[in-house]
Image: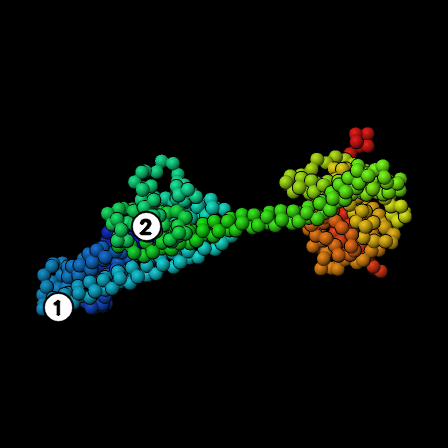
């Protein structure tokens, strides 16, 4: 394979003998036209010029033939006796031999210069290809995209055919169907040895192809086969190895990234599991123990207890089972929203009705009547799951009742594109650095000694996200906190008779 085959000079588009003939004809015609005005030396310079042009534009042998033909033409047309191949004087004979030697030297030097220039251009082109490939691979996140980009880079650089194969986790190769058995054997051997095989490599020199691994050592991610190559093309083989090194590094990076993501996911899963178990050990075991103790006392000593003591035990059982029910429901809903990819079945609902139903239930626990509401009439319908939105509002109100002692305001407002529901309290202000942490699962507030599993706000944010909305926390002027749930409003409202 000629490493310069992909970058030929422009003159090679014309047959070299046509170029030689044209140059000789031009020099001869020019010499004849200037015959009466210049000397033989000047006419010889025209042929020297033709030799220089042919040497730079043509390969070695055509330029040598042009040099020999130029001396012959000069002798035939201009050296006395003219129109013969005889030489009249020894001086002219020496001049002809000197011109021949000069023409051959010029041909050799020009050919060498031309080849070095072509090699420099080829090296610059290959360096640019490597740079573009490295830049393109930097942002790739899929192995298939690496394979496609690598195949294009190989096809641009080498005539081929070229085959790029990647290794599966079980060690087998991913190649296109119909590949010959000997090619697969070469790719596998190349991967096992972790080195290039083929002409000029010192390994399997009888092959007509290079087999180059994608990577080194344990990081080999596949192999490449480049056919129709030559042992003397050292620069071409080095360029192929550089391309394969880039591809191998990118594939190895993607493999490491995938392994890191799996490891991180597993670490997070174990962390959540440990946190959940810790929450269960305290937040579920304690109320269960209280329920068990109260139920055991009623069962074994019910006839010995007074009515007031029985009522206290029954109230404890009801309170603790209610707490267990809330924790269980929050946990199940949080797991459901996480595993379902936050997809919920939504319908057209009225926020006034949802808020009214939640307030009627929550106010049964609000004996001091601290909750006030401001819900304007004529609110647009929202696309929501009413059970989940009710649970969000109830959790926010329960938190406000638990962590504050002053008045609690529920305010609903609407803009052309969004609907907002805010729960405002006058409890201890949550520090700004805890605004993000408090929405994480199992995160507990330090605002009071109230117990909790730390799931309520995490579930509220998950419900808000599942409805395309958001839940935010802001500190209030004068003390307190404001939790605001906002969600988009569909401007295409349904007809009321269809809801």
Name the spot of residue 232 as percent of width and height, x first: 26, 54
Picture quadrant of residue 185: top left
For mark 2, give the secondary structure. helix
The answer, for residue 383, to whether it is visible in the render is no
Name the spot of residue 258 as percent of width and height, x first: 51, 48
Specify the label residue 86 is tagged with: none
Measured Cα–Cα span from mark 2 to mark 1: 63 Å
Which sits earlier in the primary sequence, circle 2 or circle 1?
1
Name the spot of residue 392 as percent of width and height, x first: 76, 44
Name the spot of residue 83 as percent of width and height, x first: 13, 58
Residue at which label 2 appears: 193
| The furthest residue to the front | 304
Graded by Cα atoms within 10 Å as few (under 14), some (14 to 19) or many (20 or more), the crowding at tag 2 reads few
Residue at which label 1 appears: 94
In the image, 434 versus 292, the foreground residue is: 292
Picture quadrant of residue 113: bottom left
| The furthest residue to the bottom | 91
Residue in view at x 88 percent, y 40 percent: 306
For mark 1, give the secondary structure. helix
Residue in view at x 20 percent, y 62 percent: 104
In the image, 252 versus 46, the foreground residue is: 252
Q: Nearer the viewer, mark 2 or mark 1?
A: 2
Above or below 18: residue 498:
above
């Amino acid at each position: 394979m000629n490493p310069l085959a992909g970058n030929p000079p422009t003159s090679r588009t014309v047959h070299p003998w046509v170029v030689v003939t044209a140059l000789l004809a031009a020099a001869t015609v020019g010499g004849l036209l200037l015959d009466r005005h210049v000397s033989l030396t000047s006419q010889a310079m025209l042929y020297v010029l033709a030799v220089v042009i042919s040497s730079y534009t043509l390969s070695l042998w055509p330029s040598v033939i042009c040099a020999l033909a130029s001396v012959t033409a000069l002798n035939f047309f201009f050296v006395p006796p003219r129109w013969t191949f005889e030489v009249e004087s020894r001086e002219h004979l020496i001049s002809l031999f000197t011109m021949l030697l000069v023409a051959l030297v010029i041909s050799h030097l020009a050919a060498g210069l031309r080849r070095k220039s072509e090699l420099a251009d080829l090296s610059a082109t290959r360096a640019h290809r490597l740079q573009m490939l490295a830049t393109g691979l930097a942002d790739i996140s899929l192995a298939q995209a690496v394979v496609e980009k690598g195949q294009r880079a190989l096809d641009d650089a080498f005539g081929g055919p070229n085959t790029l194969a990647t290794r599966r986790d079980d060690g087998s190769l991913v190649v296109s169907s119909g590949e010959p058995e000997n090619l697969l054997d070469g790719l596998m051997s190349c991967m096992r040895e972790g080195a290039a095989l083929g002409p000029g490599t010192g390994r399997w020199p009888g092959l007509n192809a290079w087999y180059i691994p994608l990577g080194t050592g344990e990081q080999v991610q596949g192999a490449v086969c480049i056919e129709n190559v030559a042992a003397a093309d050292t620069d071409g083989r080095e360029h192929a190895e550089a391309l394969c090194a880039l591809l191998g590094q990118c594939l190895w990076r993607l493999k490491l990234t995938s392994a890191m993501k799996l490891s991180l996911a597993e670490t997070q899963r174990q962390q959540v599991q440990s946190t959940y178990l810790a929450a269960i050990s305290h937040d579920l075991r304690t109320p269960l123990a209280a329920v068990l103790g109260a139920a055991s006392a009623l069962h074994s000593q019910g006839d010995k207890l007074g009515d007031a003591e029985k009522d206290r035990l029954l109230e404890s059982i009801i309170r603790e089972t209610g707490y267990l029910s809330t924790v269980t429901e929050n946990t199940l809903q949080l797991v459901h929203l996480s595993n379902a990819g936050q997809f919920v079945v939504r319908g057209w609902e009225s926020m006034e009705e949802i808020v009214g139903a939640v307030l009627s239930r929550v106010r049964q626990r609000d004996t001091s009547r601290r909750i006030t509401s401001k819900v304007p009439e004529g609110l647009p319908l929202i696309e929501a799951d009413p059970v989940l939105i009710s649970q969000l509002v109830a959790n926010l109100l329960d938190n406000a009742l638990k962590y504050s002692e002053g008045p609690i305001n529920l305010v609903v407002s609407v803009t052309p594109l969004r609907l907002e529901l805010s729960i405002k309290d006058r409890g201890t202000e949550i520090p700004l650095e805890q605004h993000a942490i408090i929405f994480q699962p199992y995160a507990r507030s330090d605002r009071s000694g109230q117990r909790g599993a730390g799931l309520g706000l995490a579930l509220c944010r998950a419900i808000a996200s599942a409805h395309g909305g958001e839940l935010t926390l802001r500190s209030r002027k004068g003390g307190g906190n404001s939790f605001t749930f906002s969600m988009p409003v569909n401007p295409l409202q349904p007809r009321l008779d269809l809801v």
